[in-house]
Image (tube, rainbow, N blue to C red):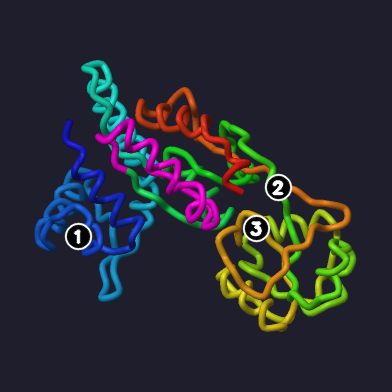
Amino acid sequence: MDDSKYEAFLLAVDHGSLTAAAEFLGYTQSGITRIIKSLEDEVGFPLFIRSKKGVRLTENGKVMVPLFREIHRAIQNARQTSADICGNVCGTLSIGSYFSIASSWLPIVMKGFQELYPGVSVSLYEGTSMQLDKLLNEKAVDCCFCSIPRTTRVDWIHLIDDEIVAWVPKDHPAAAAGFFSVADLEKEPFIHTHSGEDTELDNLIQKLNLKPNVRFTTNNAFTTYNMVAAGLGISLDQKLRASQWNGEVAEIPFSPRQFEPLGIAVPSINEASPAAKKFIKYARTINYKELV
């Protein structure tokens, strides 16, 4: 079951570079070029447009991506299933995750899983809701640790409800009061993380019909956290996000309190690979409330 052509193609798509795909697979530049050329000869048309900045898909190449992902998944599943029948759990898992979960829960989950199944390697993709939805829709990952996807139909396994809290400087009056009124988000300078990327922040603001006074935008939650500590404004995020950070920031519950469900999204439990099913089964044994 030769999967090398499809794996090389998909890695080049995901990284936007033949060089990156070659490095990941341990091939030379000429080797990865020959593999892609062989696949292009097989389908009868170019798959990539090459430039000094990397590669991008041709229009025909874009059409082939979901088909090659299905072939790649089928071959991987066949390999894992045959190994499972022989009593060997092996293969590769592709896991998507919010940045916050990847830095807090996943090291613990993956450590326990690796002790049980050392033959399974893991590729981790971190991203926002919008980025993870895209990975799920394309079946580019086996599962995602995230909120309930809003644009992709998936099988969903609920793990925990994470509270959404206000981030304010430690000397802010709300820190002493112990709560932050939702309506007050409109009254103070607001720092917005990943604005317009369908994050929990965006969805909460939309759900509550708020118009916060956005003074700063960032694409990094730790930057937002430090900007709040510096007194540049207030923000909000999941409580899990800053669980391992220390700074001059107070995390204050909203009034009324707000929560976001977190769990595991799977393109299809029934179609998941043997390794993915074992990983999901193990992940469900963890007490995530103890990790928050």
**Amino acid type assigned to the residue bearing label 1 in the image:** Glu
Image quadrant of residue 109? Answer: top left
Placement of the N terminus among the 4 image quadrants: top left
Instruction: Tell me where residue 71 appears, x and y as whole percent.
Output: 31, 35
- From the image, tell me which residue sits under label 2: 260
Q: Residues within 10 Å of mark 1 (few under 14, many from 20)?
A: few
Q: Which residue is mark 1?
A: 23
Front residue of 263/194: it is: 263
Which-is-in-front pick, marks 2 and 3?
2
Whether residue 1 sits left or right of residue 192 in the image: it is: left
- Measure the C-alpha gap from mark 3 to mark 1: 32 Å
| Highlighted range, magenta | 94-121
Q: Which numbered tag is attached to residue 199?
A: 3
Dot 2, crowdedness within 10 Å: few (<14), some or many (≥20)? some
- Mark 2 or 3 closer to N-term? 3
Q: Residue at image x 19%, y 43%?
A: 4
Q: Residue lying farthest top?
A: 85
For this view, does 60 lie left or right of residue 224? left
Magenta segment includes 105: yes
- Which residue is depicted at the point 35% across and 30% down? 275
Left or right? Give the position of 242 relative to 59: right
Task: Specify which label sits upstream in the sequence, 3 or 1.
Answer: 1
Between circles 2 and 1, the one closer to the viewer is 2
Q: Amino acid at mark 3?
A: Thr
Is residue 154 one of those drawn in magenta?
no
Image: 15 above or below 115: below
Measured from the top left, where is residue 244 in percent x and y? 55, 60
Identify residue type, mark 2.
Glu
